[in-house]
Each structure stands twice: as structure tokens, then as C-alpha cells.
Image (spheres, rainbow, N blue to C red):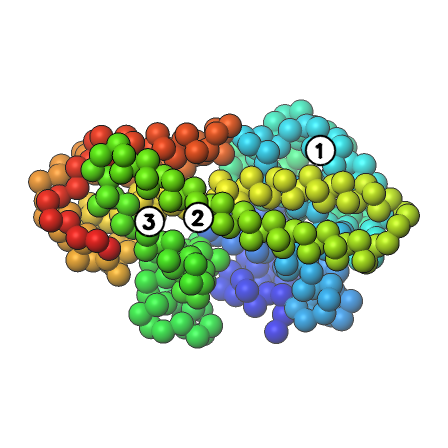
């Protein structure tokens, strides 16, 4: 077992693993790729490999350092995530630049993982640039982005760029089967995840994820009135709140572990303060992720109806609800209505992180679907 096991199948990840094993680690990386290409798990595996005391540059995946980094609970690995639509310049100036100038507390290297780095506005990117140009010898930056064009050329030029692609469906099925999934579960998860290994593993093995997906696939059938839409939105929000409470409990444990490990002195107050700020960002991000995931599932239902109607059964992402999809495909709903419904879900996904009130964004999307897409008569529950 190594830290790379969780992202097996990614050629880019294997290339990075070889570089780190031979100690060819630059001070800054930029991981580019679409959603689901494994950028986040790769960044965490890199952080663990760089700091593993048992197998330096490889990452044993078993020691305390590796396990805490993989669980995102290590004081020397800093996760920077957007606050709403942006990563504001204040986050870079107050949480990144001064912290990057300090030595690691216990690890070999201090790591900064900046997720959705393209959400740094030009001021934030320029604030980061000087640190990238004059890095501390024991500090590594890992920037993650889907949108290369939104990053300043000067920032890109300071990074080693790694490009990732989603994993092919057959490869995903093999990986899931190797993890212990049945042939049917592996097929369903690989199709539904659309190349995203993390999502595929959740669908194949996590009971909560499977339950949520089943409920969300049933939302299109239920959207007959505005009241139905608001009820469905409330259920999605309840799921988000449950997930947030679970994360809050894990965060309390992390704060306790940090206090036990660091004690007092040597800047521990600043580390705790940074951790509390990070926790707030993570909670907001988790809520957004749950809402976006729900909209993805709902949108995939409308997309699958279109694919099935036009004979592309192999492209269907939700084969486990094929009977329900077929009843919709054979209905009088026009292609235009279905296309607009799928696009409305895509648009709402993009709007969730930008909206100060994600609840309203979710309700608005489902209300519009209830208004414009009338479920076929006799459509059964998923």
C-alpha cells in the first residue's frame, strides 16, 4: 500500500509519483484538468509523499504523517478553498504569505494546496506571485484548476504543469472491481461518475452516497407543483446539513489532535486561528458540493432520457433506472424541454458557489423545472 493506491489509473499521477520518488520535486505545481480528473486526491497524495518519514518521496500510506495528511488533518498541509465566488486577496495575504515564510511544525515540508486556484482574482494571484518567485526551501505549492485561462501567465510560469484527464469507463470498472465492487455495482458507479474515480468509489461503496443518489434520481418525477419543488429542495438541504454536522464533529477532533500535538508556544495560536478559518471555508464548500451533486444527478436524468430516446443506450449514465428513463423517453415531452431542463441544472450548478444564499439558488432551479417539465403520466418512483 502507498498513498498512490487511491488514484491508480491516472497516468499523470504515475508520472508525478516517479518524479517524487527520484526527489525531483519543484517548489510549485499546477494541476490542470476537468472536474473528476482526480486533481484533489492527487494533490493530497503528493503532500503525503513529500512528507512521509518512512518512505520519503513515495508515501507509505500507513504512518501517522501519511494518514493525517490523507485525512486532511495535518498542521503543515494547508488547504485553501474559495470563499463564495472568489479566493480573496486577504486570504492570500493573511493566511498564505506569512505562513509560507514560517518553518514546518513537524513535517519535512510545508504544503499549500490551493483548490480552484482560478478563483483567485488578479490581486490575489499577484499577492501569491512574489512567494512563488522567492519560495522558502521547505515549502511547496500545489495549485488546482479547471480553467487554465483564468490564471495569470506569470503564475503559470512559476509552476510545473500537470494535465489530467478523466479515467475511461472500462478502466474505472476494473479499478472498482479490484476494490471489491460487484460487476453490477462497478458498472453503475462507473457510468454515473463519468470518469471521476472519487465519485465512483462513493457510489459503489458509501451507503449514504448511494441513498442520496437514489433520492435525487427520483426528484424529476416529483416536480409537479411549486410545493413539490420546495419540498425536494428542503430534502437536499437537509442532506447537506447532515453532512455538515458530520464534518463539524471531525473538525472538533482535528482541533483537539492539533492541541495535543503542538501544545503551547512557537506560533501555535496562529496555527489554530488558521485552522478555524479553514474549517469555516470547508463547511461552506461541503454544503455547496452537496447541492451541486444533487443538481448533477437531476440533470443527468434529463440527459439520459434524451440519450435513450435517440438510441444511445451506451451513453446512459444511470442504467439502474433504465425503466423509468424509458417511460420518459417514450412520452410526449419534446427534446427542447428536456434539453432546457438539463441545461438549467448545469447553469444552477455553476451559480451555487457564486450565490450568497445557495438555498435560494437550489429552490429557484427546482421551481423552474416544476414549471417547465411536467412528468409523464404514470411515471413510477425510481
Q: x%, y% of residue 324?
A: 18, 54
Q: Nearer the viewer, mark 1 or mark 3?
A: 3
Disc 2: CA contacts within 10 A as few (<14), some (14-19) or many (>=20): some
CB atoms at circles 2 and 1 under 8 Å apart? no
Dot 2 or dot 1: first in sequence order is 1
Q: How many marks?
A: 3
- Residue marked by disc 2: 239
Figure check: 299 above or below 207: above
Q: x%, y% of residue 171?
A: 41, 65
Dot 2 or dot 3: first in sequence order is 3
Quadrant of the rendering where the N terminus is positioned? bottom right
Q: Residue at x 66, y 35 (%)?
A: 155
Q: Quadrant of residue 67?
A: bottom right
46 left or right of 223? right
191 left or right of 353? left
- Residue marked by disc 3: 216
Pick whichever, 106 or 18, lies toward us: 106
Asked which secondary structure carries label 2, the reply is helix
Q: CA distance from mark 1 to mark 3?
A: 37 Å
**Residue 344 in view:** no
Disc 1: CA contacts within 10 A as few (<14), some (14-19) or many (>=20): many
Figure check: 360 above or below 26: above
Q: Residue at x 86, y 54 (%)?
A: 263
Q: Nearer the viewer, mark 2 or mark 1?
A: 2
Asked which secondary structure carries label 1, the reply is helix
Dot 1 or dot 3: first in sequence order is 1
Q: x%, y% of residue 42?
A: 58, 56
| View extreme (right): residue | 265
Q: Residue at x 74, y 41 (%)?
A: 274
Q: CA distance from mark 2 to mark 1?
A: 32 Å
Amino acid at each position: 500500500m502507498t498513498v498512490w493506491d487511491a488514484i491508480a489509473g491516472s497516468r499523470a499521477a504515475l508520472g508525478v509519483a516517479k518524479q517524487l520518488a527520484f526527489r525531483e520535486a519543484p517548489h510549485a505545481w499546477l494541476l490542470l484538468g476537468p472536474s473528476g480528473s482526480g486533481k484533489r486526491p492527487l494533490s493530497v497524495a503528493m503532500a503525503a509523499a513529500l512528507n512521509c518519514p518512512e518512505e520519503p518521496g513515495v508515501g507509505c500510506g500507513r504512518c501517522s504523517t501519511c494518514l493525517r495528511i490523507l485525512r486532511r488533518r495535518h498542521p503543515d498541509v494547508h488547504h485553501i478553498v474559495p470563499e463564495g465566488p472568489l479566493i480573496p486577496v486577504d486570504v492570500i495575504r493573511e493566511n498564505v504569505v506569512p505562513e509560507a515564510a514560517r518553518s514546518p511544525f513537524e513535517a519535512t515540508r510545508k504544503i499549500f494546496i490551493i483548490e480552484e486556484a482560478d478563483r483567485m482574482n488578479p490581486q490575489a494571484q499577484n499577492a501569491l506571485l512574489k512567494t512563488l518567485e522567492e519560495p522558502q526551501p521547505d515549502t511547496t505549492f500545489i495549485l488546482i484548476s479547471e480553467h487554465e485561462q483564468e490564471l495569470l501567465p506569470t503564475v503559470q510560469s512559476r509552476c510545473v504543469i500537470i494535465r489530467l484527464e478523466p479515467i475511461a469507463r472500462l478502466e474505472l470498472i476494473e479499478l472498482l472491481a479490484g476494490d471489491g465492487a460487484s460487476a453490477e455495482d462497478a458498472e453503475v458507479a462507473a457510468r454515473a461518475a463519468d470518469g471521476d474515480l472519487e465519485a465512483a468509489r462513493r457510489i459503489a461503496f458509501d451507503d449514504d452516497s448511494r441513498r442520496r443518489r437514489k433520492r435525487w434520481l427520483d426528484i424529476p418525477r416529483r416536480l409537479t407543483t411549486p410545493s413539490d419543488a420546495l419540498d425536494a429542495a428542503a430534502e437536499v438541504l437537509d442532506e447537506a446539513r447532515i453532512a455538515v454536522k458530520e464534518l463539524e464533529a471531525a473538525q472538533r477532533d482535528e482541533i483537539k489532535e492539533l492541541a495535543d500535538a503542538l501544545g503551547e508556544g512557537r506560533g501555535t495560536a496562529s496555527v489554530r486561528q488558521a485552522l478555524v478559518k479553514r474549517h469555516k471555508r470547508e463547511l461552506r464548500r461541503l454544503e455547496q458540493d452537496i447541492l451541486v451533486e444533487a443538481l448533477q444527478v437531476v440533470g443527468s436524468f434529463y440527459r439520459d432520457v434524451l440519450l435513450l430516446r435517440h438510441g444511445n443506450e451506451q451513453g446512459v449514465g444511470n442504467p439502474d433506472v433504465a425503466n423509468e428513463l424509458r417511460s420518459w423517453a417514450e412520452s410526449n415531452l419534446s427534446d427542447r424541454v428536456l434539453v432546457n431542463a438539463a441545461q438549467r441544472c448545469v447553469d444552477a450548478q455553476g451559480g451555487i458557489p457564486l450565490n450568497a444564499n445557495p438555498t435560494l439558488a437550489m429552490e429557484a432551479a427546482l421551481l423552474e423545472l416544476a414549471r417547465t417539465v411536467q412528468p409523464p403520466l404514470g411515471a413510477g418512483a425510481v
